[in-house]
Image: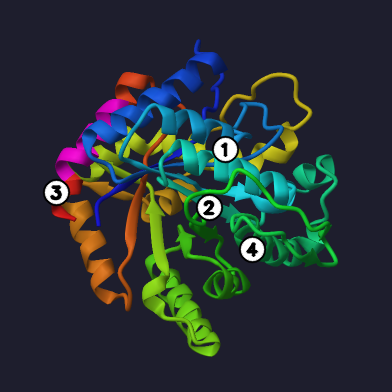
Amino acid sequence: MGLGFGLLSAQRTAGDPRGWRDLYAETLELTADAERLGFSSIWTTEHHFVDDGYMPSLLVTSAAMAARTSTIEIGTGVVLAPLHHPLRLAEDAATVALISNDRFTLGLGLGWSGVEFAAFGADTRTRGRAMSEILDILPQAWSGQPIHAPGPIYDLPEVVVRPVPDRPVPIVIGGGAEPAVRRAARLADGFFSNASPEKLEQQIAWGLDEMRKVGRDPETFRWIYYAVMWPGEDADSAWAEARDHVWAMRWKYSDMEASAARPGLADIPPLDEDTEAGLRSAALVGTGADIADQLTEMRSRLEVPIDIVARSYFATLPYEDQLDVMARLATEVMPHL
């Protein structure tokens, strides 16, 4: 099943001399590196108005990534669907699919930031209904036939969306709550999860139950699991290397809304012991064989095949150090999966 890599975000860090031009150039270099190293997929991630420039335009970036590569799957993990007009989303995704020669997977999520929803004129209260309508509209839009979408959120005219992709773009849903899993099981092609292994088992049970209810073949559905991974000489040394980078990535989510109107970059606060313990318990650190053993043991408990993605892109890493982590994953983890 291979090993994927992500989630590319092109964020700046206080004190780092790299600007966004440099970080987007590195995004494309890392995509080419991932293909060369044998990763099966590469994934981006979306947010808006964050002071560090957390990547807002995934489909634009995905097209550039596709133009730099020839074999690797390019996925969004995830586009915040209710912030996008579904017809424009359909057009852009179709364009990326054509540029990539059908290597593009559209990952969609609900979003959670009130700042983002307010700025784009979207309503957090109707985001679930908006997602369901988007999942109905997109396959119609890629059919080459007039769409019919008289929903309460999107009341669209009958138009034909062009360009038409060679095949419908695969859609996976990211999230954690039961409604998101069940919506994916009914209306999407897969689910993108970073839950704990125990919660992942519950998500799969929800999904299989929903597929039974609607008469769907589970073999038509894709499960993708992503987690922080950092291979090293042993668990302690690997965590010592990864610690500050994992903390910087996780802390930023708590700072996003506060940073929306901030003119400059904030310093990353110190990491306390309790938070560190939680971060370490959720990460896969150790030798490559140790990490692979944990993933293999997790797979053995699940009822379905599952693809694995290493969430091992860290914006705080210099390019050469990031490439070193990728190379370790490719040579020490990937062969065991």
Estimate the x, y position of residue 95 in percent, counting from the top left.
56, 39
SS class of the residue under badge 2? Answer: strand
Which residue is most to the top?
Answer: 17
* Nearer to the camera, 236 or 130: 130
Label 4 residue SS = helix
Relative to the observer, which residue lies in front, 199 or 223? 223
Answer with mark 4 or mark 3, whichever residue precedes in sequence.
4
Counting residues from the start of the chain, the first of labels 1 and 4 encountered is 1
Q: Amino acid at mark 2?
A: Gly
Q: Secondary structure at mark 1?
A: helix
Give the numbered dot on residue 107: 2
Q: Is residue 161 magenta?
A: no
Pointers 1 and 2 in contact (CB under 8 A)? no
Q: Is residue 10 left or right of residue 53?
A: left
**According to the image, label 3 marks what residue?**
335
Pointer 4 residue: 135
Query: Which comes before the other along the chain, label 1 or label 2?
Result: 1
Q: Determine the CA span between mark 1 and mark 4.
A: 17 Å
Amino acid at dot 3: Pro
Instruction: Say what secondary structure mark 3 lies in.
Output: helix
| In the depicted structure, whether residue 221 falls above or below residue 242 | below
* Magenta stretch: dominant secondary structure: helix
| Residue range (magenta) | 323-332
User: Up-down: is 185 above or below 25?
Assistant: below
Q: Which residue is mark 1?
A: 59
Viewer can see residue 212: yes
